Image (cartoon, rainbow, N blue to C red):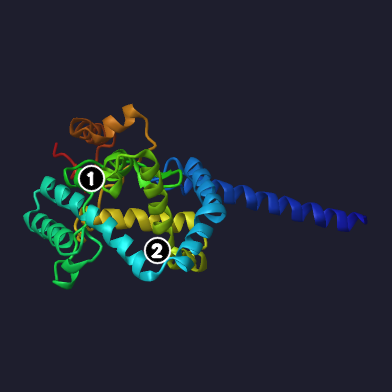
């Protein structure tokens, strides 16, 4: 290799190394404070993607091709009827009388006139579903969402929603089935049926998402926030860093600590540039 060509190659390699280093630093600094477990979550996300491609998606395609649409709709209605009953309970826990009445009427109408929920007469009568779950109930009463989590097989969640999931998952036909084999079969049917309903949506995500993980995460968090606030979330919320240790989090959330920190900041920087409690410049003290 000629000396000038070798020197040019070395310069190019050095520039590339610097660029990669800067890109890596920018990636670390840009970590979303809602997702301190991003490395772990991405690993689980990749596992879920692999399991979906190998098992769930092929099974869902077969299910959709073999089972008539009328039967699939009946399965959807039955699961929705159990979900409406759980929504009625959570509406009551959230002190929402209108939603409680709507969800209770849906269950009554579809159970009695819809042959145990196979037919959705309530929607035809204009009684629309108002879905509620235990995660929304906890959020309604001020429980923070906590860090974003990706659960094996179950997918996107948060610490709050994951803690409510064991009870939320009971709102299925499994609740009234005692035989283990039958319960396992119903669980498998629910997984495959749910995946079959998402076949079209997953294709759209594949087409539009540059980073599928970020797309799913942001969509999930935005949707859950909207559901907790009944479609009218506050315009701005205080950013919470879930990656702080326990001591820092308690100090940051304590009003007394915040007041003490403001006082220390004012004492440390006297004069026209000292900030008041709301960030405005404080006037010079008169002699």
Q: Nearer the viewer, residue 166 or 116?
A: 116
Q: Foreground mark, 1 or 2?
A: 2
Query: For the residue labelled by badge 2, is the local secondary structure a helix, a strand or a loop?
Result: helix
Q: Which residue is mark 1?
A: 134
User: Residue at point 30% right, 39% down?
Assistant: 178
Q: Nearer the viewer, residue 216 or 100?
A: 100
Estimate the x, y position of residue 36 in percent, counting from the top left: 42, 41
Estimate the x, y position of residue 85 in percent, counting from the top left: 18, 52
Query: For the residue labelled by badge 1, is the local secondary structure a helix, a strand or a loop?
Result: helix
Query: Looking at the figure, which quarter contains the N terminus?
Result: bottom right
User: Residue at point 37% right, 45% down?
Assistant: 182
- Left or right, 42 with respect to 158, comes to right
Would residue 174 be seen by someone viewing this image from the given angle?
Answer: yes
**Measured Cα–Cα span from mark 1 to mark 2:** 23 Å
In this rendering, is residue 265 above or below 4?
above
- Answer few, some or many: residues within 10 Å of disc 2's Cα (few below 14, many 20 plus, some between 14 and 19): some
In this rendering, is residue 286 above or below 56?
above
User: Residue at point 18% right, 47% down?
Assistant: 140
Q: Which residue is mark 2?
A: 197
Q: Nearer the viewer, residue 229 or 126?
A: 126
Would residue 156 be seen by someone viewing this image from the given angle?
Answer: no
In this rendering, is residue 35 above or below 131?
above
- Left or right, 95 with respect to 143, comes to left
Estimate the x, y position of residue 247 in percent, counting from the top left: 32, 27
């Amino acid at each position: 290799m000629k000396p000038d060509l070798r020197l040019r190659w070395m310069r190019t390699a050095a520039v590339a190394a610097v660029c990669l280093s800067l890109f890596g630093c920018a990636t670390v600094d840009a970590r979303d404070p809602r997702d301190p477990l991003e490395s772990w979550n991405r690993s689980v996300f990749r596992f879920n993607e692999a399991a979906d491609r190998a098992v769930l998606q092929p099974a869902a395609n077969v299910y959709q091709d073999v089972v008539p649409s009328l039967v699939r709709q009946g399965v959807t209605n039955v699961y929705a009827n159990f979900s409406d009953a759980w929504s009625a309970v959570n509406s009551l826990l959230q002190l929402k009388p209108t939603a409680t009445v709507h969800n209770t009427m849906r269950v009554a109408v579809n159970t009695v006139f819809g042959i145990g929920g196979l037919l959705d007469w309530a929607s035809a009568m204009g009684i629309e579903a108002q879905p509620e779950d235990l995660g929304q109930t906890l959020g309604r009463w001020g429980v923070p969402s906590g860090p974003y989590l990706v659960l094996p097989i179950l997918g996107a969640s948060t610490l709050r929603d994951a803690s409510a999931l064991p009870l939320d998952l009971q709102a299925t036909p499994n609740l009234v089935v005692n035989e283990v084999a039958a319960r396992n079969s119903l669980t498998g049917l629910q997984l495959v049926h749910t995946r079959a309903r998402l076949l079209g949506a997953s294709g759209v995500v594949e087409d539009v998402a540059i980073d599928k993980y970020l797309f799913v995460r942001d969509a999930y968090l935005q949707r859950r926030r909207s559901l907790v606030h009944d479609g009218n979330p506050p315009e701005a919320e205080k950013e919470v860093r879930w990656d702080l240790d326990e001591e820092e989090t308690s100090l940051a959330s304590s009003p007394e600590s915040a007041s003490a920190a403001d006082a220390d900041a004012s004492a440390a920087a006297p004069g026209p540039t000292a900030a008041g409690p709301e960030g405005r410049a404080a006037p010079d003290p008169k002699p």
